Amino acid sequence: MGAKVMDPVFVGVRHHSPACARLVAATIEEQRPAYVLIEGPADFNERIDELLLGHELPVALFSYSDQHASWSPFCDYSPEWVAITEGRRHHAEVRFIDLPAWHEAFHDVSNRYADAELRYAEVVERLCVEFAVDNVDVLWDHLFESDEAPEALDQYFDLLRGTATADDGDAAREEYMASWVRAAVADAGDRPVVVVTGGFHTPALKAKLDGGTEWPEVPERERGASYLVPYSHARLDAFTGYQSGMPSPGYYQQVWETGSGRAADWLVESVATRLRRRQQPVSTADLIAARTQAGALARLRGHENLTRTDVLDGLTSALISEDLTQPPPWTRRGTLQPGAHPALIEMLGALRGDKVGQLHPDTPAPPLVNGVQELLRTHGLDGEGKVALDLTNAEALERSRILHRLRVLRIPGFERTSGPSESAAPQLDEQWVLRPCEERLAALIEAAENGATLEEAAGVALERRSRQAQLEQLAAILFDAVLCGITALSGRVKESLSEGVRVTGDLVALGHVLGGVLGLWRHDRLFGTAKDSLLGEVIDAGTARVLWLIEGLHGGPAPADAGRLRTMAATRDAVLHAKAALSLDTVDVAGVATRVSNDAEAPPDLRGAALGLAWTLGAQPDVRKVRGIEALGDWLAGLFAVAREEVLASPELVGVLDEIVSSMTGEEFLVALPALRLAFSYFPPRERETIAATVLAHRDLDGDARSLTRVSVDPMIVAEAMAVEARVDALLVKGGLA
C-alpha cells in the first residue's frame, strides 16, 4: 500500500492583513509542510529566488504583455510574502499557483492583490448593518484585526463566497490553482501541503480536490516580461486610489511590527507631530483625551485590542470641535475630497506612512533601465540642477530628445520649465530642471513594457495614447512625437489629424489642432518640418473647415468663448504664416470673415473676431459702425483676440471706443465692466499704456499714461463703491435730502 495522502491545509486570507499574515506564519510553523502554494503568477516560479535577495519592502512583481500590465505588491505583512519567507525558512517547496498576470483571466485586473468587494457587496452590507459598522474595512478590523489569533475566518469567507458567483476569469484561475493543489498533494504523500490564497477563492478550491494530479503547464506569452519594482506605502493606500485589501499601510506596518496597542500610541503621536508641523495647536491634554476616548470606544465595541477606527474616532472627537464638511474618509472607500479638515488630512498622512521600497542591487532589470542610465551618463543628464539647451546645436537637440522621451514616459525627475510649445511662436532654447528621485527606477522598469530602448518605448507609449485620443489630443501627441524625434509615429498621427479636421464640427478642438500643427510648421528650423506635405494638408483642411463652420454659427449674446477666439486667432496665423499650404486665396478668407462680421445673428465675440481677421488680411473696417454694436465687451474681446496690433495702430478706433464708454450711464458701465475687462486683458501692460496714451491724445489732455493703468485698487472694488454711492444718492433724492 502507498503512503497515505494528506488533505491540503487551506489558509484563506485577506490581502495585506497583519492578522492573516500571522495566521499563515503560525500554520507553516505548525504543519512543517512539503509544499507552500501561494496565489501568485506561476510563470515566476523559476525566479522566486529573486524575491529573497534581500529587498527593502514594499516591492511589487510587475508583469506586462502586448495588451496588459499588472502589479502583485508585497509588504512586510502581506500573507503571500510571509508564506514565501516562512515556507523557505522551513525548507518547503514554495510555488506560485495562479495564472500569469498577462493571461486573459486578468484582462480587467491591474493589481492581483486588490480585493474586489463588489463581488459580494450584498452580504458585506448585511454584515455591516448587523455589526453597526460603516464599511468592509471597519468590519474586518472589528472581526479579525483586533484579535491576535483570529477565529472564524473560514466561516467568513464561506459566507462571502456563498453569495457570489465567480466570473469567467475567476473560474479559470480557480481551476488552474486547483490543478496545482492536486499535483502537490499527490507528490507530497504523507507530508502536509499549505495553500495560501485570497479567501474568496478558498471555498472553490476546497471543492476541486478530485481530478488529475499532473503538474500543470505554465502558459507562455509571445511578448512581455516580469520584473520586480520598488513600491511604496503611498501606492498601496486605498485612500490614494489603490483598492487594496487593507488601507492605511503605514498604520498596519506598525501593527505588524509592534502590535495593536503600540500602533495606537504611534498613530496618536504621528498625527500630533504632523499637525504641529503645520502650526495647528495640539495640547498634551488633547492627546490624553484622544487616547482615553479610543480606549473607551474599543471597550464599548467589544475589541480585545484597539483597532484603527477606535483610534481615529478618538482623535476626531478630541481634535475637531467644528462640523465636518465631509464624512471621515475611513467611513467609506475613496480618496479625500478638497476642503477637508487639516486634522483629517494629517490623520490620513500618518496612516499612509512614507515607506518606499528598495531593490537589492543584484535584482535583474529590463534593458531599458541600463540603456537609459547609460544615455544619461553619456549626455551629462544624470546629475541635479538646471540644464539650458540651445536647440540649434545638434548635440543639445539630441539631449532635448532624450529628456522629452523620458517626459513622455512619465519618468520623474525631469521637468521642463520653458521651451517650444504648441500654438506658439518659434522658440530656439529649452530650460530643464533635473533632480534624482527614488521613484525613477520603478517608473523605468514599468516603462519597459513599451520597448527595450528609450526611443522605442517613447514611440510605443505615444502610439498607444493616439489610439483612443480625441482630435485635440492628437495635436499634442504629434507635437510630442516631433519633440522626441519619432518620425514613424508622426506620419500616422498626421494622417489621422488630416482626416479628423475634414469632418469635425467642434470649432474649439479644430482651433487647438490648427494651432498645434501650425506651431510645428513654424518650428521647421528645429524639427525639419518645413513644407511637410501632411502638415500642409492639415493646415489647409483645418482653415477651410473653420471658415465653413463660422459662417453657419448663429446665436444670441453670450459671454465671449475663449476657445472659439483661440480658433479664430489660429486661423489668422495659418493665413499669415502658412500661406503656401493653403488652397484658399487671402481675398476669399477675408470675404468670409467680412460676411460673418456683418451677420447680425452671429455671436458678438465671433463677429468681432471675424472683423479682426478681415482687418489683419488688409480689409479696412468702418469704425463708425462700432457705435451700433450690442454686447460691446464680448465683441471687443473677439476683435482684440485676433487684431490686437491693428487696434493699437488705430487712434480712430480707440477714440470711438473712448466716446462710447464715456457716454455710458453709471449703471450701463457697471453692466458692461466684466466683459470690457475680459476684452482688454488681451493686451499686456505695455500695450495698455499705449491705449491710455491714445485716449489722452484723443481728449487733448496731458498726463502720465502709465499712472492710468497702474491703479492700486481693484477696479471691481471701485465699481462696487460707485454702485453704492449711486444708491445712496438715489435714497437722498427720494427723501428730499439731496
Image (tube, helix red, strand yellow):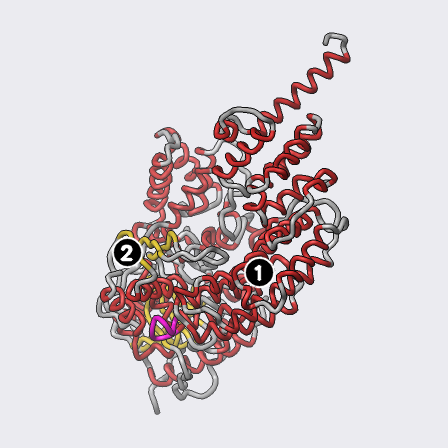
Asked if residue 38 can be seen in this view, the reply is no
> Residue drawn 58% across and 51% down?
130
Q: Extreme top residue here?
A: 737
Secondary structure state at the residue bearing disc 2: loop
Q: Earlier in the sequence, mark 2 or mark 1?
A: 2
Q: Which residue sits furthest bottom? A: 1
Disc 1 crowd rating (10 Å Cα; few below 14, some 14-19, many 20+) is many
Residue found at x 69% / y 58%: 591
Q: From the image, which quarter does the C terminus lie in?
A: top right
Q: Which residue is mark 1?
A: 575
Name the residue type under label 1: Val
Q: Which residues are magenta?
A: 451-457
Give the residue displayed 51% in from the left and 44% down from the top. Answer: 338
Query: How many angstroms separate mark 2 from mark 1 (CA)?
Result: 45 Å
Residue 89, label in figure: none
Q: Amino acid at mark 2?
A: Pro
- Give the x, y percent position of residue 609: 64, 50
Q: Is residue 455 magenta?
A: yes
612 sits left or right of 270 in the view: right
Residue 397 seen by the camera:
yes
- Residue 436 is tagged as 2
The answer to whether 77 appears left or right of 318 in the picture is: left
Q: Are marks 2 and 1 in contact (CB under 8 Å)?
A: no
